[in-house]
Amino acid sequence: DAGITQSPRHKVTETGTPVTLRCHQTENHRYMYWYRQDPGHGLRLIHYSYGVKDTDKGEVSDGYSVSRSKTEDFLLTLESATSSQTSVYFCAISEGQTGNTIYFGEGSWLTVV
Amino acid sequence: QKEVEQNSGPLSVPEGAIASLNCTYSDRGSQSFFWYRQYSGKSPELIMFIYSNGDKEDGRFTAQLNKASQYVSLLIRDSQPSDSATYLCAVKANFGNEKLTFGTGTRLTIIP
C-alpha cells in the first residue's frame, strides 16, 4: 500500500461544469502524477508534479490544470468538462530515493454527460 | 510509431504453461523498464522493473531486456488462473526523467 487516496472515486457530471479530482498521499513523496486510461490508448500522462508548486505537462494536458500547494495533495481540475474527458483517472506517486518505481492510486471514474 | 508497443492480445495460455509477453520501444535512450499487472476495474500494480540487459527473476516472473533490439519481455512460469489480467509495459526515458510511458497492454487469459 503506497498510501494514495483518490477522491471522488466515482463522479457523473454535466458537460461544461468544472470538476476537481483530489489525490492525497501519506508518504511524503516528491513526485506525483495524473494519468488517464482509455480503451485503445492505455495510460497517458496528463500532468505531473516534482514538488510543491512545481508542475509540468504530460502528453494529454489540454483542458486540464493541476495544483500542488502541499506535498501530500495533488489536484486535477477539468476547467469545463467535455464528453471526451469521460475516463478513468489514476493518480500515481514515485517512491524511493531515485524515484525508480511508480505506484498508482485506486482510480477515479469520471463520466461527463 | 507508438513509443511503447505491445500486442493487445488476447493471449490465451493453458494453466501451468509459460506465458510470454512482449514489448518494444522506440526511444533508444530509454533506461528503465517496468511491468505492471492490471485486473479489470482495478489500478495497475507493479510486478517488476529492469535496467540492465539480460534476465531478472522474481518468483515465477522473469523480465528480459535487450536494449540493442529495443525489446523487453515478461515470462510467467507455471501460469495460474489468477494471472489472468492485462499486463502493461512501461518505459522511463532516462535516469532523472521521472515520467513513465505506457504501452496499451496485453490481455492474458490463463485457461484452467
Image: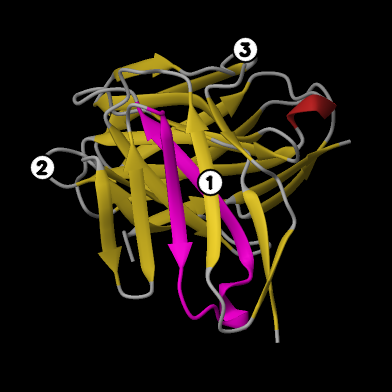
In the rendered image, the vertical position of residue B49 relative to residue A65, given as above or below: below
Q: Is residue A105 visible?
A: no
Q: Could you tell me how far apart the alpha carbons at marks 2 and 1 are, in whole angstroms?
A: 29 Å
Q: On what subunit does the disc labeled 1 rest?
A: B
Marks 2 and 1 belong to one chain:
no
The residue indicated by pointer 1 is B22
Q: In the picture, residue B81 is in which quadrant?
A: bottom right
Q: Position of residue B78 (x, y in %)?
A: 49, 81
The residue indicated by pointer 3 is A62
Number of the front mark, 2 or 3? 2
Point 46% across, 23% down: residue? A47
Q: Position of residue B44 (x, y in %)?
A: 51, 55
Q: Position of residue B10 (x, y in %)?
A: 75, 56
Q: On what subunit does the disc labeled 2 rest?
A: A
The residue indicated by pointer 2 is A97
Horizontally, is A16 left or right of A25 in the view?
right
Nearer the observer, A6 or A45: A45
Q: Which residues are magenta?
A: B69-92
Point 61% across, 46% down: residue? B105
